[in-house]
Amino acid sequence: EVQLVESGGGLVQPGGSLRLSCAASGFIFSTYWMGWVRQAPGKGLEWVANIKQDGSEKYYVDSVKGRFTISRDNAKNSLYLQMNRLRAEDTGVYYCARVDQGNGMDVWGQGTAVTVSS
Amino acid sequence: SYELTQPPSVSVSPGQTARITCSGDELPKQYVYWYQQKPGQAPVMLIYKDSERPSGIPERFSGSSSGTTVTLTISGVQAEDEADYYCQSGDSSGFYVVFGGGTKLTV
């Protein structure tokens, strides 16, 4: 079964850091682009970042550039999102997703909640 | 920054046809994807590359495009189709992803 499982969410103070992880199974992880999408409470979906199969290309939404870093470990079938200098507006559920069929996201994890608050 | 525009809400009666639009300047040049999200759940891909349907998605969901507007059509709407629907595409480079604001479908 194709599956993505996120972990690492939690409560963090403004200015703090958090590292999200996504464990992939059921498919050849190293052959797919991967990405992160977030959703603030009661709001819509917002793309955060994508990473190429070998990690050589990374793209970010403007609001997280310089603060967030997407990375992957193909040997461990894992995707990561290092989040630094967190702000209240970074609060939300963060989804890991497999990128396929061009730029679409065909497999999603269940999400991990991040709350930035003092 | 590039934006995709969707109506905030659409309302239909069971058995009717629902049409949800998504507008954006780059849509003639970039593929569009559609997702369904029910409360407390992760999104599910309904349509990829404008009009293709992943396996397991009912035939009543279809996608079409015309210029800078794409449309998700749900034929014979059922109560279980009540959800939020999002379109997604890319900017002119194709590497930066953008989602529409979402449309709440009420049945």
Image (spheres, coloured by chain):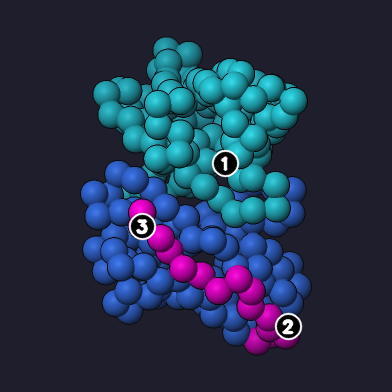
Chain colours: A cyan, B blue
Helix, strand or loop for disc 3: loop
Q: Disc 2 versus disc 1: distance between alpha carbons?
A: 31 Å
- Residue B2 numbered mark, or none: 3
How busy is the neighbourhood of tag 2: few (under 14 within 10 Å), some, or many (20 plus)?
some
Residue B44: where, in percent of width, then height? 58, 52
- The one of B47 and A111 positioned closer to us in this rendering: A111
Whole-percent x, y for residue B53 in the image: 46, 62
Give me the residue at 46% from left, 26% from top. Answer: A68
Q: Please state, as top left, top right, bottom left or bottom right, where the C terminus of chain B lies in the image.
A: bottom right
Q: Is residue A6 magenta?
A: no
Tell me the residue that label 2 is attached to: B14
Tell me, yes or no, if residue A109 can be seen here. Answer: no
Can residue B42 be seen from the camera position used here? yes
Query: Label 3 amino acid?
Result: Tyr
> Which of labels 3 and 1 is toward the front?
3
Tell me the mark number nearer the camera, choosing from 2 and 1. 1
Give the number of the disc on residue A38: 1
In the image, residue B47 sits, relative to residue A18, either above or below, namely below
